[in-house]
Image: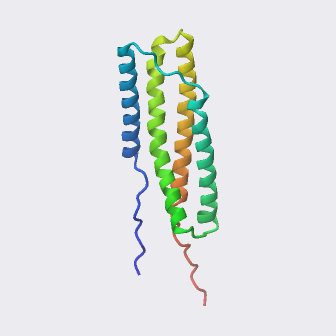
Amino acid sequence: MTEPRPTIRPTGWRAVVVAAMLGAGVTWLVTQGLQYAGAALPTLGTGSWVPMLLLAALTGWLAWITHQAVGVRREALEPRTAVMRLQLAKAGVLAAAALGAGYLALVGVSLGGWPAPLAQGRVLHGVVAVVASVAWGVAALALERACRIPRPPEEPPESE
């Protein structure tokens, strides 16, 4: 009997790079448009990075309990649960890449007005948001990996 082949591939690095490029590109275009129009850049605060830290913590916790169930105890997840966790992981990886690159682009644009207090706030909160998005992305990758169906353990040869 042939072993079933996986129907969903892990998130590839190309998809992550494209998401990051889109996040950075859109953010850069918006900031350039705002500056061209004479409008102020958006201010950043704790609301820009606290939700991502919470998502990173929750996704990491879900990755840990999924790994314990599937990888350690070899329990089967309900199909709907497994698919929802995998979708959450894939979406988390791509969203974290896009948001992190977007915040990084905003930090880069804000460095031009560095001595100003608003620019310092943008840079500080932007860097923390980039770190939070990286944490979320790593947790999402761990959840995606935890959703993999482990290979069956090899049986020891029978002794006669």
Image quarter of residue 158: bottom right
**Picture layout, residue 108 above or below residue 13:** above
- Residue drawn where x is 40% and y is 49% of the image: 12
Q: Foreground: 74 or 27?
A: 27
Q: Please provide percent x and percent y for residue 63.
A: 59, 54
**Picture layout, residue 137 above or below residue 4:** above
The colour scheme used to paint the residues is: rainbow
Q: Foreground: 157 or 123?
A: 123
Q: Is residue 28 left or right of residue 72?
A: left
- Residue furthest bottom as drawn: 160
**Picture layout, residue 117 above or below residue 65:** above
Query: What number of labels is visible?
Result: 0
Q: Is residue 126 left or right of residue 27?
A: right
- Residue drawn where x is 40% and y is 45% of the image: 13
- Residue drawn where x is 58% and y is 43% of the image: 55
The quadrant of the picture occupied by the N terminus is bottom left
The quadrant of the picture occupied by the C terminus is bottom right
Image quarter of residue 94: top left
Q: Is residue 97 left or right of residue 55?
A: left
- Residue furthest top as drawn: 115
**Picture layout, residue 39 above or below residue 68:** above
Q: Please provide percent x and percent y for residue 123.
A: 53, 21
Q: Foreground: 123 or 35?
A: 35
Q: Please provide percent x and percent y for residue 132.
A: 57, 36
- Residue drawn where x is 51% and y is 69% of the image: 151
Image quarter of residue 24: top left
